């Protein structure tokens, strides 16, 4: 029982890590895009 529980936890943590990385990547891309849009906005008033 203990083995399967730890295995489930390992899978759970792997999923959490993947989700975290995915969210961070999306935020990073979104920030990059918005930053470029803001730069364009200020460059061409």
Image (cartoon, rainbow, N blue to C red):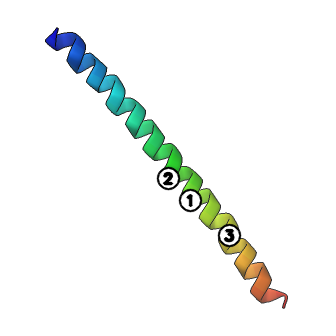
Q: Identify the residue shown where x is 56% and y is 59%.
A: 28
Q: Which residue is mark 3?
A: 34
Tell me, yes or no, whether the two marked residues, 1 and 3, touch with CB atoms within 8 Å. no
Q: Closest to the observer: 9 or 43?
A: 9
Quadrant housing residue 13: top left
Which residue ends up furthest to the right in the rendered image? 44
Q: Quadrant of the N terminus?
A: top left
Q: CA distance from mark 2 to mark 3?
A: 15 Å
**Disc number at residue 24?**
2
Residue 3, position as x, y percentages in the image: 18, 12
Q: CA distance from mark 2 to mark 1?
A: 6 Å
At horizontal 45% and vertical 37% (from top left) the residue drawn is 18
Distance Cα–Cα, label 1 vs label 3? 10 Å
Mark 3 closeness class: few <14, some 14–19, many ≥20 residues within 10 Å: few
Q: Residue furthest top?
A: 1
Pointer 2 with pointer 1, Cβ within 8 A: yes
| Residue at image point 46% right, 45% down | 21
Q: Which residue is mark 1?
A: 28
Point out the tag, 2 or 3, that comes first from the N-terminus: 2
């Amino acid at each position: 029982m203990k083995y399967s529980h730890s295995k489930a936890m390992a899978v759970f943590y792997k999923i959490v890590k993947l989700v975290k990385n995915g969210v961070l990547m999306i935020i990073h891309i979104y920030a990059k895009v918005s930053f470029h849009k803001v730069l364009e906005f200020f460059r061409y008033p």
